Image: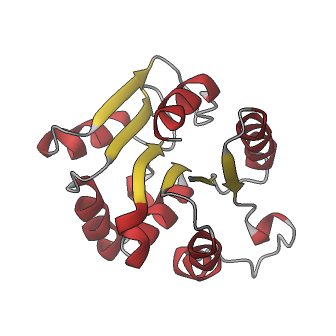
Amino acid sequence: MLHLYLPGYNPTNAAFATKLGRKFQKLEMNCYPRYWPHWQEISADTIFDPLNEVTQIVPVVKEFKRGGIGIIAKSVGTRVAVEIAATAIEKSIQYVILMGIPLSLYSEDELVKLHSLLGQTGFEIHIFQNNGDPVANAEEVTDLIKEYPHVKLHKYQESHHSYEYLSDIIEIAGKHN
């Protein structure tokens, strides 16, 4: 099984991507933490394009032939996760963890795809949400999933957008490895 980690936009997310990848490796679990290209080339012209990221990630996932995939995504990484789930690899998905979903950044098309993903019942879907997240409004996320009772909401009494809940991520991923 391949565990795909799609981090947040800020380059500070690289450290957690590395930490998560190492932890999975120690547990003999295959992890592909995505390092966004703009972390290397930040300029005024740098644009984060979820669809472009999908074209880079899907071939890597398709090359991995052992078992399904798990998707772990934070913040803007959730936008990429939604796009990946809408591709042909959707049948390979074993679980999805979405953390700090920034609904205000989603286009109408992405919102439709997010609802489509949340409506899936063939795999586990978990949402991690900090009550005081300054980027991903907890009330909006909670309202979003009310129509999807199979989605598991994990609420944290925190006021940040970090989502470095390594043990909770590992616990969910480990069930599917």
Q: Nearer the viewer, residue 13 or 67?
A: 67
| Residue 139, quarter of picture | top left
| Residue 103, quarter of picture | bottom left
Coordinates of residue 55 in the picture (x, y in percent): 58, 83
Q: Residue at x 61, y 79 (%)?
A: 59
Coordinates of residue 110 in the picture (x, y in percent): 35, 70
Q: Is residue 16 visible?
A: yes
Question: So how many labels did they put on this image?
Answer: 0
Q: Is residue 82 visible?
A: no
Q: Residue at x 30, y 73 (%)?
A: 108
Q: Residue furthest top?
A: 157
Indicate whether 95 appears above or below 49. above
Indicate whether 159 appears above or below 109. above
Task: Report whether 135 appears left or right of 86.
Answer: right
Indicate whether 108 appears above or below 35. below
Coordinates of residue 41 in the picture (x, y in percent): 86, 73
Q: Residue furthest front?
A: 66
Q: Residue at x 41, y 47 (%)?
A: 95
Q: Nearer the viewer, residue 92 or 137?
A: 92
Q: Residue furthest left?
A: 147
Task: Report whether 150 appears left or right of 159.
Answer: left
Coordinates of residue 152 in the picture (x, y in percent): 30, 33
Q: Nearer the viewer, residue 81 or 173?
A: 173
Q: Residue at x 70, y 39 (%)?
A: 24
Task: Report whether 119 appears left or right of 44.
Answer: left
Type of colouring: secondary structure
Indicate whether 11 appears above or below 40. above
Task: Report whether 18 appears left or right of 75.
Answer: right
